């Protein structure tokens, strides 16, 4: 609050918003820089395919990940084949969420099929599979 010297009326009743705007701009820049670094998930080398849809970003889905070493995770929480059906029933089916399966390209086919069998046994009939788009189209690779 400043004192107006010339008029002699006392304090000025206006708020100086410049420091507030400065702080908000700094916070905006910090969030813009750190938001891309906050991507969650596990490191998986996904297989590539030509037609890939974007994974929904809402919280209405759950991602099951199978890493190269065979470790399985629901989102980022470890799970075993023995516990898989119970977790999927409780976290996906009862909460009416969509389940997506991410498996490393080096995971044996049998492990993926076994996981899909447990998912189906838990009552999930709609399963999304996560893949990546190839780096180059096939026409460019042939040349």
Image: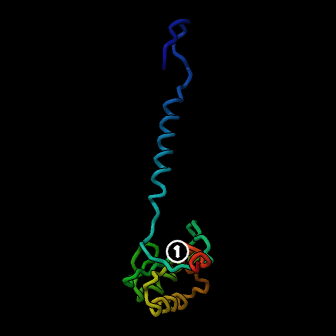
Q: Residue at x 57, y 66 (%)?
A: 57
**Which residue occupies the foreground of this view, 67 or 86?**
67
The residue carrying pointer 1 sits among few (fewer than 14), some (14 to 19) or many (20 or more) residues within 10 Å by Cα, namely some
Relative to the observer, which residue lies in front, 21 or 52? Answer: 52
- Can residue 96 be seen here? no
Which residue is painted at 54% across and 79% down in the image?
A: 48
* Nearer the observer, 93 or 138: 138
Quarter of the figure with residue 78: bottom left
For the point 51% across and 80% down, which residue is it? 47
**Rendering coords of residue 142 (x, y %):** 58, 80
Looking at the figure, which quarter contains the C terminus?
bottom right
Q: Residue at x 60, y 79 (%)?
A: 138
Tell me residue 94's x, y (percent).
Answer: 56, 79
- In percent of width and height, residue 108 lies at 44, 90
- Give the color scheme: rainbow, by chain, secondary structure or one colour: rainbow
Indicate the secondary structure of the residue bearing disc 1: strand
Can residue 54 be seen in this snapshot?
yes
**Residue annotated with mark 1:** 62
| In this view, 123 is above or below 90 | below
For this view, does 124 lie left or right of residue 115?
right
Q: Identify the residue at the far front of this view.
A: 143
Q: Is residue 107 above or below residue 61?
A: below
């Amino acid at each position: 609050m400043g004192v107006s010297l010339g008029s002699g009326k006392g304090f000025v009743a206006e708020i100086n918003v410049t420091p507030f705007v400065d702080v908000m701009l700094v916070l905006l820049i910090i969030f813009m820089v750190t938001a891309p670094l906050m991507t969650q998930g596990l490191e998986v080398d996904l297989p590539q395919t030509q037609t890939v849809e974007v994974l929904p970003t809402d919280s209405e889905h759950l991602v099951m990940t199978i890493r190269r070493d065979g470790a399985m995770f629901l989102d980022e929480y470890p799970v075993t084949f023995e516990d898989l059906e119970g977790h999927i029933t409780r976290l996906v089916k009862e909460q009416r969420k969509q389940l997506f399966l991410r498996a490393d390209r080096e995971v044996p086919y049998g492990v993926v099929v076994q996981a899909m069998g447990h998912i189906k046994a838990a009552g999930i009939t709609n399963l999304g599979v996560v893949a990546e788009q190839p780096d180059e189209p096939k026409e460019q690779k042939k040349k």
